[in-house]
Image (cartoon, coloured by chain):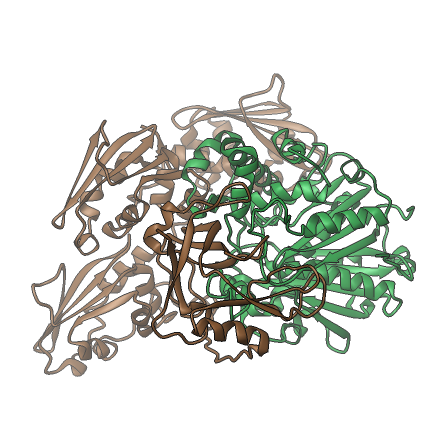
Chain colours: A brown, B green
Amino acid sequence: MAEYWGVKVEDIFNTMQERFRVEGAKGVDATFGYDIAGAGKWKLTVKNDTMKIEKTDDLAGCASTMIADSETFVGVNIGKVDGTNAFMSGKVKVDGDLGAFGKTSKMFKKYVPAKKEMTTADYIQDMFSTLVERFQPKAAAGLDATITYNIGGEGGGIWTAHIKDGKCELKTGKPDKPTTALNINEAKDWVDVMLGKSDPFSLLSAGKASIEGETGLALKLGEIFAKYVAPVQEFGVRDYILDMFSTLVQRFQPAAAADLDATITYDIGGKDGGVWTATIKGGKCTLKEGQPDKPTTKLCINEAKDWVDVMLGKSDPFSLLSAGKASIEGETGLALKLGEIFSKYVPPTGGGTPEQELLVLKKTISVNMRYATGPVMGKFLHMMKEKKIYTNKCPKCGRVHLPAREVCAECRIPATEWLEVGPKGQVRYMEYVYYASPDPLTGETRETPYGMINILLDGCVGNDTFAHYIRRDQIDRIKNGNNDVSGTRVRPVWSDKPTGSVFDIKYFEIDE
Amino acid sequence: MAHKKNRNVGIIGIGQTKYSSHREDVNQPELVHEAVRAALDDAGLTMNDIDCIVHGNMELFEMIHQPDCWHTLGSGALGKDSIRITTGGTVGATTACAADNLVASGMYDVVMAIGFEKLQEGHTTGGITNMADPLWFRNLQTGALTGSKAYDLIREFGEERAKNVSLMYRIIMDKHASKNPLAHRAFGLEFEQIPDLINTSPKLVGDLKLIEMCSQSDGACVVIFACEKKAKELSKKPVWVRDHITVHREETFVIFGYDKKYPFPQTHRFAAKHLYERNNIKKPLDYFDVFEMYDPASWWAVDWIRDFFQLEGDEHLKLVENKEIMIGGKMPMNPSGGVIASNPIGATALVRVAEAALQVRGDAGDHQIPTEVNHALASGFGGTMWTVLMMLEKELNW
């Protein structure tokens, strides 16, 4: 099976059981399908805090199924591909209940590929994939040449650098007559040369390598291409987490915990997390993985990365708590004392200049506002209180405004004649809204789907429709009208306590 | 509706930032400064050469007021005459029109137009919703999202054709965006994905799907305008502003009657008609070499092609279906990828002018259209169907 970034699709499924988080699966009783092109189908069953994953041919009965190609699936799981972009661009699809599928993200810790040593093949691959970016146009000014690398042995291959007009292009294979060809018998030897463990002259003199064509050019390769630097393994979130807990006991401050008899559990989520418990008794501290039945205090942190930020001083625990990214169970007071019980964590990479933290100020602005209605809109709203829809008409063109307007925008003269319209009418157009936009007046997200209808009230003409909500359970029965056919007839449902607002009508409902 | 200029005006400098959903590495003045610096470098000028600054954005979107003051450190406006423009989606286009007017009037020789937005720092949908009448429509608004144009096109051309053409337009824009290193979104979509995306892209409102709607971006764009004398002195390739037109209408969306006897006023068609008439352009589709259109969603975009080019029937659909709007086609539209790819609102409509001017200059890089560009059109859109159009020319010969 194909590997992407060194990970197979099966690796992701085979580790699901060990990555399962009972906390994230509470109350879920469903089956989910995964249809991964080029790899197969899997069925995930979650019930009573347990899970089962099986490879199958039949995904019938799944609440929802994720459809993706192997590369995208692996990429999203290991964080190489942006999940939102993949979803938006259709590379990841969900067949069935989208909301239900969203729950699966909380059920599993993220997949962490096992770290492995770079093989000869990895180095050769990396070397050639970075060749073009290591190209030095200045050193190759005026050069028009092809340089073939013919590398034998395990991990080897044939590549040719085409250099012309200060540009370098790498192709696999060998042209008929390269300017220079380097033949290296064993890939491993070439890796040693590139890593500085060996030198090319030793290889040449030992008969492990040969040069065809222009030898002079081969000697200039060190100038034409910048030195190859092997990728460095970064100190990642997981490394910090492991380092943090392996140093916890030595950071214990007995003086601050003299009379303390307690267990403190750290439940750290995310792909780099884990569960550890510090047991403190008699001025001593021990650390174990896992958690006891009833820890004195339990800190739950959703994402390991956030906890690393806290420990490195980039963030503070209260922000995590208030943002719902962390929670405390048991004795809260003890959690607040942790900063005294354990001395500050100092990362092993300390000493260097830390990158400047980019702070973001977060504010919620709430402003009281007033808006004078004026006599015209005022009258329109006042009549709402009396459960009547009153509006005005242009004396020149006869346009009946909705809502009432001070002047006719088209004729630019005051609209003085008042008349009662509706309250019943027909729907001319309904916006069927799936997107849960926030209600700007309350800040709360509206329940979706909902329908916003444009009603041609009886007595009105043209485009002067009245906009309002339709009763939510009726949205699928609404038909839009036009001047050939009537839309669904609707009537207003009035509020019991009208205040002089368009929401004295709670919503419209089908007039039946 | 004559539009008289005291003197000709040329674009002599263009600067843009990368458009992105996340520019927390810089604050607002710093983001503005990136584009100001790029435009000054492009023009080979310093701030000493700038007489006046026109600053455009939607202050509600970031919840800071008087942004032109906040941004002074980034814009270099200290001690300069400065004017602020805030006209919704059209703000960038209005900023360009204002700069053109200020130079054409004779008041200033060199004017810098700045369009800016950092949409991640506020609440765009909330801001747009607050534009609506608080007594009437504000409670019902869903920002700029509407399924009505999809409804119209499906009604007129049938479901299959309409849905296909909308996605076809979207994918053409994505292909263009892939050639523009500054574009915010370039997914790498293929035409083969059309049936799939029709079925799977989540619906927002009616038949408007997530993939068809524009992004919310951070970014800034700066365009420098100069009088003819200065433009010829300072620039090897000035791009001349021939004319511009703005058409507004009332604040309510009185367009949903669906009664043939009462066609609602089409600002795009109206504006384009008057602009072409007064410039004696009979066949806009033949006249213009490129069109940078403000396309907030692919449904709107497809429909508006008909209005802007004064087309009838399904001519506009055919332009999309036959890929005539692609780079290399008869009427290349949005070689930059358009608004659907990058949308820092206050800058967005100015980016249309900037990108159209780059095409005229032949400096658009990988998304430069292959044939010569002598005449370019740029549009802005905002509010309850407001229109701004600007015409650019390579030669001063009209």
Residue lying at 87% horizontally and 70% vertically, measured from the top left: B107
**Residue B124 vertical position relative to residue B354 in the rendered view, above or below:** below
From the viewer's side, name the closer residue of B230 and B9.
B9
Outermost residue on the top side: it is A176
Q: Is residue A138 visible?
A: no
Q: Quadrant of residue B372?
A: top right
Q: Is residue B324 left or right of residue B99?
A: left
Residue lying at 33% horizontally and 44% vertically, measured from the top left: A77
Q: Is residue B4 left or right of residue A26?
A: right
Position in image of residue A228 (x %, y %): 51, 42
From the viewer's side, name the closer residue of A347 and A45.
A45
Q: Quadrant of residue A137?
A: top right
Position in image of residue A117 (x %, y %): 33, 41
Q: Is residue B229 left or right of residue A380?
A: right
Residue lying at 43% horizontally and 29% vertically, measured from the top left: A187
Q: Quadrant of residue A260?
A: bottom left
From the viewer's side, name the closer residue of B275 and B154.
B154
The N terminus of chain B - image quarter = bottom right
Position in image of residue B55 (x %, y %): 69, 68
Position in image of residue A453 (x %, y %): 46, 54
